[in-house]
Image: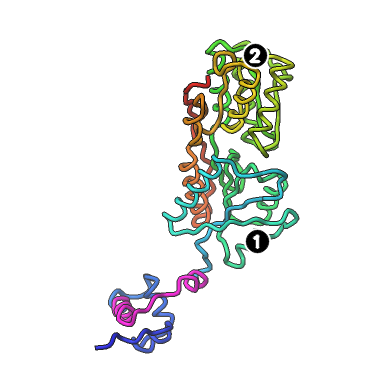
């Protein structure tokens, strides 16, 4: 006996069931407007004829794409996602998948001002996840003015129209610096990225607070900003200058990659880590425990951060609720300090 012919459209099911197309659509989407008996009968016909509801069409009819756009502003000079950001992206993708959403990478041109509105209006995305190292204040304002739902990583932003998830960067900078102070260091340098990125500015504030709490006067000559691009090389060059011109016995860095560059520069001068100079990283990415020496660092859980971003965005899309989550900082002590 041959298998039942596969029907092609909702109209075919409506004809077989003796109901309207709208009734079939509502039944297949489990609408409370349709009685259970009618739902069961329509679903049985769909199964018998191997009918699969077209998911893109269903989403379009509901004016919802179930897609979140991950914004990558690639025109920021030299910006390349680091290892922590890649871990975070994996968490975002996993968190979205668990809630029935897909991830779309969106890389707008630098002069585009209406891309967010166009993506939402056309049904290509319901909202956006923004990684703050690539989001300048101007770009953030463009997003706010678009009215599209979005959530930002790395920028604690209570009282705003958008959601945010961030680490406690002030506490992280303080923990890293205090650990070096407690081990007897007094000439402690700060090597970080550009301070237009809020998380970098907050980590430096934590560094300065720890020095003040210990009664150590801030030396501006020990504060170094470097570009996000090529962090190992830039950090190595910065620390080489610090060692030659000022002499330091501790280095607090903006990321684990910066810390690896710092260690390279210290060794190049014939010094030992941590005996001569202690180094603390930030993020605790996978390579931190396998470096030589293994990195003392401030841990951020990239996978959890990504999942929290996904959850915050979907909540804002579905309910309009804006949330601001701060993840605690954790000092992981290994061999470098």
131 with respect to 305 (left or right) = right
Above or below: residue 220 compared with residue 72: above
Residue 75: x and y in percent read 71, 50
Alpha-carbon neighbours of circle 2 within 10 Å: few (<14), some, or many (≥20)?
some
Residue at 36% x, 84% y: name it. 6
Question: Sequence order check: which comes first, mark 1 or mark 2?
Answer: 1
181 with respect to 36 (left or right) = right
Above or below: residue 23 compared with residue 225: below
How far apart are the alpha carbons under marks 1 and 2? 50 Å
264 with respect to 194 (left or right) = left
The magenta stretch is: 39-61
181 vs 206, nearest the viewer = 181
Q: Is residue 147 magenta?
A: no
Residue at 57% x, 16% y: name it. 272
Residue receiving disc 2: 187
Residue 206 can be seen, yes or no: no
> Which residue in the rendered view is the most extreme toward the left?
1
> Mark 2 falls on what kind of element?
loop
Residue receiving disc 1: 117
Closer to the eye: label 1 or 2: 2
50 vs 274, nearest the viewer = 274
Residue 237: x and y in percent read 70, 27
Quarter occupied by the N terminus: bottom left
Q: Is residue 58 magenta?
A: yes
Residue 321: x and y in percent read 52, 50
316 vs 66, nearest the viewer = 66
Residue 132: x and y in percent read 62, 43
């Amino acid at each position: 006996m041959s298998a039942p012919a596969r029907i092609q459209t909702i109209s075919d099911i409506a004809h077989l069931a003796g109901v309207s197309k709208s009734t079939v659509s509502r039944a297949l989407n489990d609408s409370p407007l349709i009685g259970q008996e009618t739902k069961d009968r329509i679903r049985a016909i769909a199964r018998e004829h191997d009918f699969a509801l077209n998911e893109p069409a269903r989403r379009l009819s509901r004016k919802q794409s179930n897609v979140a756009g991950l914004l990558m502003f690639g025109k920021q000079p030299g910006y390349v996602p680091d290892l922590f950001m890649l871990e975070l992206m994996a968490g975002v993708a996993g968190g979205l998948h668990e809630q029935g959403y897909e991830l779309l990478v969106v890389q707008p041109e630098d002069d585009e001002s209406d891309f967010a509105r166009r993506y939402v209006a056309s049904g290509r995305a319901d909202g956006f996840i923004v990684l703050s190292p690539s989001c300048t204040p101007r770009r953030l304002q463009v997003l706010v003015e678009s009215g599209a739902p979005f959530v930002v990583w790395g920028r604690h932003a209570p009282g705003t129209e958008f959601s945010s998830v961030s680490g406690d960067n002030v506490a992280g900078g303080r923990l890293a610096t205090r650990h070096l102070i407690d081990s007897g260091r007094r000439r402690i340098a700060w090597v970080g990225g550009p301070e237009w990125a809020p998380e970098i500015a907050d980590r430096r504030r934590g560094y300065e607070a720890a020095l003040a709490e210990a009664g150590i006067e801030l030396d501006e000559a020990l504060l170094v900003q470097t570009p996000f691009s090529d962090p190992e090389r830039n950090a190595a060059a910065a620390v080489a200058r610090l060692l030659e011109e000022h002499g330091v016995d501790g280095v607090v860095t903006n990321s684990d990659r910066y810390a690896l560059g710092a260690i390279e520069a210290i060794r190049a001068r014939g010094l030992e880590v941590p005996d001569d100079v202690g180094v603390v990283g930030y993020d605790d990415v996978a390579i931190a425990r396998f470096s030589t020496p293994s990195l003392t660092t401030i841990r951020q859980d990239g996978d959890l951060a990504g999942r929290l971003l996904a959850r915050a965005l979907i909540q804002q899309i579905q309910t309009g609720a804006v949330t601001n989550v701060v993840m605690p900082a954790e000092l992981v002590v290994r061999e470098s300090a």
